[in-house]
Amino acid sequence: METHANWYERAILRQMVGQYNITEELINKLRELFPDKLPRHDIPLDQLRLLQGQQQVVDMIEKLFEESFEEDAERKEYIHV
């Protein structure tokens, strides 16, 4: 018989969705659209700042995704003690 905890863990792994509904697929797409690379040509400072801002947003979304799973794992450890 499957426990609620086992079902929950399988559901999380199957969907890979954190508490903010961020999927691994979304992060991969953002990394594809906004790669963390320096431009190969000279660009104005405002354009460079825009690229930096985009990368910071992608990094923050990825950090929230990872933190949501860490928090979930900590909650599971607390419940099982």
Image (spheres, grey):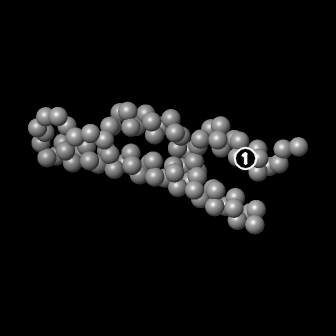
Q: Position of residue 9 (x, y in %)?
A: 70, 46
Left-right relation of 37 to 31: left
Residue 67, how many percent across, how many down?
A: 52, 55
Dividing the picture into quadrants, the one containing residue 55 is top left
Q: Quadrant of residue 38?
A: top left
Height in image: 54 above or below 71? above
Residue visible at 41% across and 51% down in the picture: 60
Q: Which quarter of the figure is the C terminus placed in?
A: bottom right
Which residue is rendered at x = 51% and y = 49% of the image?
65
Left/right placement of residue 33 relative to residue 72 reads left
Amino acid type, label 1: Tyr
Residue at (71, 42) in percent of width and height: 10
Question: Exactly how many numbered labels are in the figure?
Answer: 1
Which residue is under mark 1?
A: 8
Quadrant location of the N terminus in the rendered image:
top right
Task: Tell me the element at label 1.
Answer: helix
Please state the horizontal and vertical placement of residue 51, each as a whole percent of the image.
Answer: 25, 43
Whether 72 is drawn above or below 8: the answer is below
Q: Is residue 29 left or right of residue 67?
A: left
Single out the residue that lies furthest toward the right: 1
Which residue occupies 45% across, 36% down? 28
Query: How busy is the neighbourhood of tag 1: few (under 14 within 10 Å), some, or many (20 plus)?
Result: few
Q: In the visual, does 58 lie left or right of 6?
A: left
- The x, y position of residue 7, in whole percent, is 76, 44
